Image (cartoon, grey):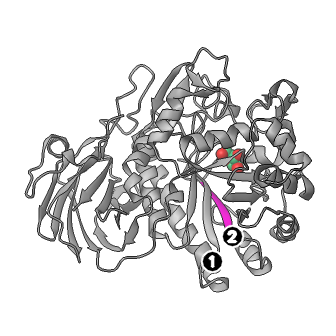
Amino acid sequence: MPDTRSFRFIAPVFAVLLSVPCAAAAQSSQPLSATVVIHADKPGAEINPDIFGQFAEHLGHGIYGGIWVGKDSPIPNTDGYRNDVVAALKDLHVPVIRWPGGCFADEYHWRDGVGPVAQRPVTVNTNWGGVPETNAFGTNEFLDFAEMIGAKAYINGNVGTGTAGEMADWLKYMTSDQDTTLTKLRRDGGRDRPWKIPFFAVGNETWGCGGDMRPEYYADLFRRYASFLKTPPGERPLIIASGGHDDDTSWTKVLMSTVHQNMGAISYHYYTIPSPTHDWQHKGPTIGFGENEWMSTLVNALKINDYIKQNIAIMNKYDPQKKVGFFVDEWGTWYDSAPGHNPGFLWQQNSIRDAVVAAATLNIFESHADRVRMANIAQMVNVLQAMILTDGSKMILTPTYHVFHMYIPFQGATLLPSDVKTAQYTYGKQSIPAISVSAAQGRNGVLEYSLVNLDPDKPVKILTTIEGANPSQVGGSILTGPAMDSHNTFDDPDAVHPVAFTGAKLRGHHLEVTLPPKSVVVLSLQ
Ligand code: AHR
């Protein structure tokens, strides 16, 4: 795909506003206004690349059909992995992938997915559609896939229906270099060298599908299971405890106060649904919605900021040195099932609304970079807020994919604090800040600046002052669309894609940008 971030788009100083912003501004009423001060002289924490992580579960066509088609498929593949999907994911610089679930993880017995494929048992995916699970995609297939796209592996162990011994053996199977029966099984499956397993979780959503536990009970289970997770020296993964969700901070409190070793991070899940009353039976449609649903989706998406803050406040009390990470290892939009799709497969379209949610959420994660050191959007292919949708041999990149691609320079960048004063976007009785921004110094020294206009109707004129840096060039890209639900389809795969943004005017320390309605802009200044 074209590299829209290349500096061929850098505009000279005093560049004039070109087509995209002017056209949008002309159509709309008076722009809203905002001011931002970026403190380039007060660098903060490193933005861990892993906050741009992904989640791939055995769910619908997330794995089968989406990533894995098998060696005999007519769909072009390499050793069973779709060539088109692999190429798109490589281009996205995916830092880490969480697998095999999700709810699936706590019913997954890893031995079902190793050894000769023809001899693997066919089980039932009880969580997602009750469909047969062939186990053709197992541990070797996942870890080879992660290596193939250059991503780190995050394995989620089974505490709900698995034993501590089964979990311990799985880690040995993957990481041991000794000659044992377990490593012979791995070698017979085609993998001689052990894999690197940087992250391993003990259970998933143990408050729900992972076993309907109380935090006190789970905390003791975590202590027991984690103490048997053994690897060769230097190969121990960071162990992740299953934490809370939404506004429930009790899991963080109990884990932080009762687990004193082995816990490298606490996981946390938050899904954005449009329903203002958080009604999971009537979440709202994926496309064809009105401004009321645009607004309620964004109101709900932004709530994650307060929820993260509440959890971090608890963690700071027990761990002021910030040794334990807060991993948002499931997040994203969740709509009513799209018509014509198996409701158990969680397939949904992905529009400009999802792009705005993704960008605003990534900005929130970046603002908590010292504690939020991993996040995994749900999910990678064909499930929920997916990067990629496939239909047989066809593939499309979603607006969310494009946001993640635009944000690549933020991976490993250093957060630069910013002060924002912005007009509100108001609809009905609800009101939210009209913009979301984040600034960082990239690993190559370039100042990266993301700006999101949450208002679907009005442009926002943003005057930014940069303190402590003297950029002389600015360039970047914009993602927007004509409608709130603009999206790509298999017939029109490029309806929504980033284009060069030349509407930034730089004068010394001052940058003026008019953001079109419902847009995501990422600028590079140097
Ligand atoms: O991502 C879909 C599901 O959402 C996951 O399996 C589960 O952990 C969560 O409830």
Q: Which residue is mark 2?
A: 264
Q: Horizontal and vertical percent for residue 247?
A: 63, 66
Quarter of the image containing the N terminus?
Answer: top left
Task: Please report contact status of discs 1 and 2: CB closer than 8 Å, yes or no.
Answer: yes
Task: Decide which of 81, 495 is in the foreground and name it.
Answer: 81
Q: Horizontal and vertical percent for residue 461?
A: 20, 58
**Residue 417 visible within the image:** yes
Corner quadrant of residue 208: bottom right
Task: Decide which of 268, 13 is in the foreground and name it.
Answer: 13
The amino acid pointed to by label 2 is Gly
The amino acid pointed to by label 1 is Lys
- In the drawing, does residue 442 fall left or right of residue 226? left
- In the drawing, does residue 6 fall left or right of residue 1? left
The magenta stretch is 264-270
Examine the structure image and report whether residue 483 is included in the region drawn in magenta.
Answer: no
Rendered residue at 48%/50% (across/down)? 297
Q: Which residue is mark 1?
A: 323
